[in-house]
Amino acid sequence: MSPDNRIAICPGSYDPVTNGHLDVISRASAMFDKVIVAVVNLPMRKGSTLFTAAERVAFIEHATAHLNNVEVEPFSVLTVEFARSRGAKAIVRGLRAISDFEYELELNQLNRGQAPDIESVYLMASAKYSFIRSSGVKELATFGGRIDGLVPDEVVVALQERINR
């Protein structure tokens, strides 16, 4: 791979991956030569996950199979360390609303302090996905709400099975 290649990572817990996540990943894939979807093994902010890292990776791989420049990997180190180890010069994140901004600003400043050579790139959520949160999807599913159209079909089935156990 030449040093001119533009590589970005899209980090997150993806528990579960939503159509909003997939929209950001798809749009990032049009901007960068290679996008690595970085699935955090043990999210600090959210505690335990409903799906294992391997399950989350598989959901994303299936949903992004049509994007030739997208790879999916789990990670368990600082985001900037993972980015640097993969030759990425950008961290792509999605923004839905003002409520996301404060957290993302803090995260950006912490990342810049650790790795000033890695840029944070923010993509505004598409209007039709601006309200979707993984936690909201899980809550809807828990109480019998419809989640089709919010997550890939495969995730709808897996989420309903997991919750019904």
Image (cartoon, grey):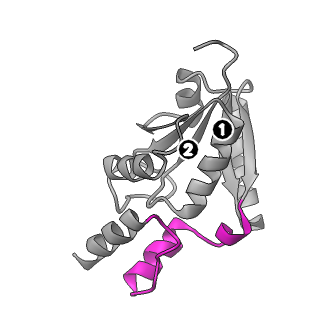
| Left or right: residue 120 compared with residue 2 | right
Q: Which residues are magenta?
A: 125-152
Q: Residues within 10 Å of mark 1 (few under 14, many from 20)?
A: many
Could you tell me residue 42's position as x and y percent? Answer: 41, 48
Q: Nearer the viewer, residue 116 or 67?
A: 67
- Lower position in the chain sequence, tag 1 or tag 2: 2
Residue 122 part of the magenta segment? no
> What's the residue at 66%, 29% (across, down)?
114
The quarter holding residue 89 reads top right
| Left or right: residue 79 compared with residue 56 | right
Could you tell me residue 6's position as x and y percent? Answer: 68, 26
> What's the residue at 52%, 73% (across, down)?
149
> What's the residue at 55%, 63% (across, down)?
19
- At mark 1, the secondary structure is strand
Q: Nearer the viewer, residue 112 or 34?
A: 34
Vertical placement of residue 153 versus 26, above or below: below
Q: Residues within 10 Å of mark 2 (few under 14, many from 20)?
A: many
| CA separation in Å, label 1 and label 2 | 7 Å
Farthest residue in the bottom direction? 144
Say which mark, if any, is on residue 80: none
> What's the residue at 45%, 78% (across, down)?
139
Q: Amino acid at mark 2?
A: Pro
The quarter holding residue 98 reads bottom right
Q: Amino acid at mark 1?
A: Ile
Callout 1 touching callout 2 (CB < 8 Å): yes
Say which mark, if any, is on residue 91: 1
Say which mark, if any, is on residue 11: 2
- At mark 2, the secondary structure is strand
The quarter holding residue 15 reads bottom left
